[in-house]
Image: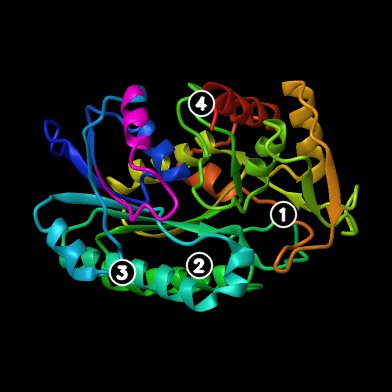
Amino acid sequence: MGIKNLNTKKTILVTGGCGFIGSHFISILDPEKYKVLVIDNLSNSKETVLDKVKKINPIDIAFYQHDLRNYHAVKNLIATENIKSIVHFAGLKAAAESVRLPLDYYENNLMSTINLLKIVEKYNIESFIFSSSATVYGDSKVQPVDESLPLSSMNAYASTKIMCEQIITHASELHRETAFFNLRYFNPIGAHPSGLIGEDPLVIPNNLMPFILKVAQKKEKYLSIFGNDYPTKDGTGIRDFIHVMDLVEGHLAALNYGHDNSGLYTFNLGTGIATSVLDLVYTFEKVNKVNIPFEIIKRRVGDVAVSFAAVESINKKLNWYAHRDIGEMCRDAWSWIKNAPH
């Protein structure tokens, strides 16, 4: 393969770049190779996180506050930039909330993805990386789940991810020069090892770790665990928790692969390790020497009993492996809170 543009930085559009995963992704990009254009509507994030990212990584970042549902605003912005890749993190992401607000989820998640794919259609985009979710497997009885399994939805959030993957598949059939990636996340937790950035939602958190952290800070009296009557070893749900740094390194592996390859690729982003909710709580207590009192409440609508990843496909194709363990995830999450208490 020929040598291309050695002296030219590639511009990457990162949607939702002020969020938990987007900010960590930017923190690992090589500033000698890339510059970043961030679009975020700040509905659940803060622009100030980019200042912290720059302390970690002196990369060129341009920020624009836009709603991706406004195609013309996004198109006009892109027209002035030579975008080579799009990494699409933005979207509504709470499964339980989507049960109450299904139309909001369909409108936001589908429209934003369609508008970005129109950008791919209009401009010479090298790669398009989409944040999908393990929820697309529904309540699969086959575990671990691999990418060949049929998809199933238990809530509107999962349905939007399935639909977006289908739309991306059709787009890939028309734009064969572009690399498209559907990356199915399992349960990202942890924080950057510097302690400068971590998960900092503006609204009530929907994931387990932010609740654990609130209890550890004594901002909440106890952790609510949704159900202990699942058919699992301790009755609590089984999940595949992955360190956010491993997760974003998976995105970087996809970005690098897309420089010289095209086509459609779908991968799980997980560790392949099954961990119960109580396993996570007890590990957090042990490694951080913090007590996490909890109470058991009824199951939450849309939750499944067991979900963990088969990861052989991404291991082989992208040579990517998750290597941070659950203890490191818990230590880094607590370090982030201690370093920058909220």
Q: Earlier in the sequence, mark 1 or mark 4?
A: 1
Residue under label 3: 69
Q: Earlier in the sequence, mark 3 or mark 4?
A: 3
Residue sitting nearer the eye, 258 or 302: 302
108 vs 217, left or right, is left
Above or below: residue 144 compared with residue 51: below
User: Which residue corresponds to the image point at 18% horizontal and 64% vertical from the top-left?
Assistant: 73
Q: Is residue 50 magenta?
A: yes
Q: Quadrant of the N terminus?
A: top left
204 vs 47, left or right, is right
Q: Is residue 89 magenta?
A: no
User: Which residue corresponds to the image point at 17% horizontal and 69% vertical from the top-left?
Assistant: 72
Which mark is drawn over residue 340? 4
Q: CA distance from mark 2 to mark 3?
A: 16 Å
Label 3 vs label 1, nearer the camera: 3
Q: CA distance from mark 3 to mark 1?
A: 35 Å
Q: Earlier in the sequence, mark 4 or mark 2?
A: 2
How crowded is the residue under tag 1: few (<14 C-alpha within 10 Å), some, or many (20+)?
A: some
User: Which residue corresponds to the image point at 75% horizontal and 57% vertical from the top-left?
Assistant: 143
Q: Earlier in the sequence, mark 2 or mark 3?
A: 3
Q: CA distance from mark 1 to mark 4?
A: 36 Å
Which mark is drawn over residue 161? 2
Residue sitting nearer the eye, 117 or 148: 117
Amino acid at circle 1: Pro
